[in-house]
Image (cartoon, rainbow, N blue to C red):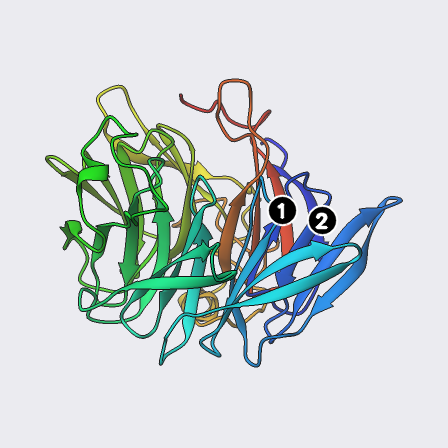
Amino acid sequence: MAATAAVAIHQFAECITCHAWSPDQSMIAFCPNNNELHIYKFIKDKWEKLHVLSKHDQIVSGIDWSRSSNKIVTVSHDRNSYVWTQEGSDWVPTLVILKLNRAALCVQWSPKENKFAVGSGAKSVCICYYEQENNWWISKVIRKRHESSVTSIAWHPNNIYLATTSTDGKCRVFSTFIKGVDTRGSQSSTSTDSKFGEQIAQLDLSSTWTFGVRWSPSGKTLAYAGHNSMIYFVDEVESAPAAQNLTLRDLPLRDVLFVSERMVIGVGFDCNPMIFAADQTGLWSFVRFLDERKATPSTSKASQLSEALGKLYGQSKQGTSSDTVEPSKPRGGAHENCITCIVPLTKGRDGTIKRFSTSGLDGKIVVWDLENHITVAK
């Protein structure tokens, strides 16, 4: 059996809510399940804590670190967002006006980094941008579309469309075109012809909460996960959506990541990244678990149930697995509790993602290498 694809495992805290890397990947920012943002730098073969940013009053629920401008954006259950700018050796926060009456749950910079989106428990999405005249960050809000909390967001490569998932079980795509921020006619598609907040698509594929939405590199395919242990793939969302529902026999996913146009990594309550791939006809299927481990037979069905419930409800404890499931399922691998966040790292010459990192409720950040462990389908 091949060695594990995990090339680095870092135990930073007891629990990690979310994480993000600096543009050169020499620093990492994460929330240790509280109101703080910790920034570490790799110095002389070890990680050293450089900064603790504690402007928020409640748990930091989302972090994103911009690639070109080197700015960090954070959101929190305190309903606030800050854009952090490095000035010398300090990080200076700028408050973003969100106008929320419920927690901010997720955040992501747009591809051009001229705006970012914030999903919230207020059934709304804030599209935030910098207003040069007044020297502040303001937001326009997409309201009255979601019936419940917005759990995750994903920008289309065109910098205009935004996909969202929600605890109302739906995945939606909106236009975020803002006059003065975006340029009309700059794209070949009809994305710049739509008005701000216009709903491009609504996907009613799941009967349960939905999480972890992502676009493929070309923007032609959308993937997201349901809490009913299903993953959904939708092609041509803008024109004629064609959906595939893939039922898992394992625990639900929490986040997904396209590593190429036809390959997706899913992470969640099984504590083990799952690889999905599409064949030449576009049919998606589960390939295998990335963290390969040797199985240990379970002594009873009761222990199987206890292990499954423990992972599902976030109880970090060692367990064993039955012979009736995949041999790569047992615990004792890189992660020992639910994986909640997956972030892309290095790309190959062909544009495919070769490395990514994951974090979760076990307080670990794990770096994974796909280079020598699986052929990435283009």
Of residues 82 and 135, the one nearer the viewer is 135
Residue 253, horizontal then vertical, whole percent: 38, 55
Of residues 253 and 112, the one nearer the viewer is 112
| Residue 175 as seen in the image, left or right of residue 316 | left
- The kind of residue tagged 1 is Asn
Above or below residue 344? Residue 314 is below
Mark identifier at residue 70:
1
Residue appearing at x 73%, y 68% in the figure: 52
Residue 127, horizontal then vertical, whole percent: 36, 58
User: Which quarter of the figure has residue 91?
Assistant: bottom right
Residue appearing at x 30%, y 70% in the figure: 149
Label 2 SS: strand
Residue 56, horizontal then vertical, whole percent: 58, 76
Residue 85, horizontal then vertical, whole percent: 64, 56
Q: Which residue is mark 2?
A: 27
Q: Is residue 217 visible?
A: yes
Q: Is residue 229 visible?
A: no
Label 1 SS: loop
Of tags 2 and 1, which is closer to the observer? Answer: 1
Above or below residue 151? Residue 267 is above
| Residue 276 as seen in the image, left or right of residue 67 | left
| Residue 71 as seen in the image, left or right of residue 237 | right
Q: Residue reaching furthest left?
A: 240
- How crowded pointer 2 is (Cα within 10 Å; few <14, some 14-19, many 20+) is rated as some
Locate the N terminus and report the quarter of the image it occupies: top right
